[in-house]
């Protein structure tokens, strides 16, 4: 609302509201407000991922959901950079691989379908 000139407003109107991908779509088209929103999102996501890495020390961490399809330069590359700089395993060289979930946004649907077959 603070930036009515932003492409975010146009995309939200066209899509019937804001979705997780809206800011990434606008940022991909060069919208500065959307780029700022994406950077903030990645910072918050990185804080959560860093906490998970510090607590659980996984070998691999998969990112899924609607925004997982965002371009690497807007999501995965900055996420990896922040987590690598902030997590404790950086001192031991045991950094987890941070990857996109192979099933993307369909993981929940596929899991539910497999569960229904088991019943």
Image (cartoon, rainbow, N blue to C red):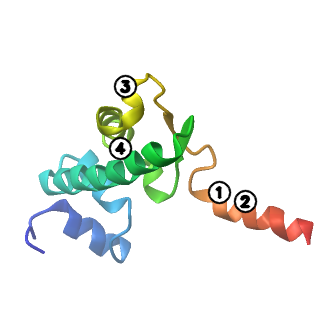
Q: Residues within 10 Å of mark 2 (few under 14, many from 20)?
A: few
Who comes first in sequence, dot 1 or dot 3? Answer: 3
Q: Earlier in the sequence, mark 4 or mark 3?
A: 4
Residue 58 visible, this angle: yes
Report, in whole angstroms, how far the alpha carbon at label 1 lies from the one at label 4: 19 Å
Q: Which residue is mark 3?
A: 91
**Foreground mark, 4 or 3?**
3
Instruction: Kindly report which numbered mark, 1 or 3, lies closer to the viewer in this rendering.
Output: 3
CB within 8 Å, label 1 to label 3: no
Residue marked by disc 4: 75
The disc, 2 or 4, on the residue closer to the chain's N-terminal end is: 4
Mark carried by residue 42: none
Q: If the image is split into quadrants, where does the C terminus sit? A: bottom right
**Mark 1 nearby-residue class (10 Å; few <14, some 14–19, many ≥20):** some
Across and down, in percent, residue 52 comes to: 46, 50
Left or right placement of residue 18 versus residue 100 in this view: left
Which residue is the site of mark 2?
A: 110
For the point 26% across and 50% down, the residue is 43
The answer for how far apart the CA atoms under marks 1 and 3 are is 33 Å
| Left or right position of 6 against 14 | left
User: What is the spatial separation of the Cα atoms under label 2 and label 3, in whole angstroms?
Assistant: 38 Å
Q: Which residue lies under the disc numbered 1?
A: 107
Residue at the spot 52% in from the left edge and 52% down from the top edge: 64
């Amino acid at each position: 609302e603070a930036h009515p000139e932003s492409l975010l407003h146009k995309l939200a109107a066209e899509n019937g509201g804001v979705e997780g991908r809206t800011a990434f779509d606008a940022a991909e088209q060069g919208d500065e407000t959307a780029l700022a929103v994406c950077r903030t999102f990645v910072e918050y996501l990185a804080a959560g991922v860093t906490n998970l890495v510090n607590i659980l020390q996984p070998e691999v961490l998969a990112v899924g959901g609607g925004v997982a399809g965002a371009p690497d330069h807007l999501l995965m590359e900055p996420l990896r950079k922040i987590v690598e700089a902030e997590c404790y395993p950086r001192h031991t060289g045991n950094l987890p691989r941070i990857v996109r979930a192979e099933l993307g946004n369909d993981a929940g649907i596929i899991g539910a379908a497999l569960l229904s077959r088991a019943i």
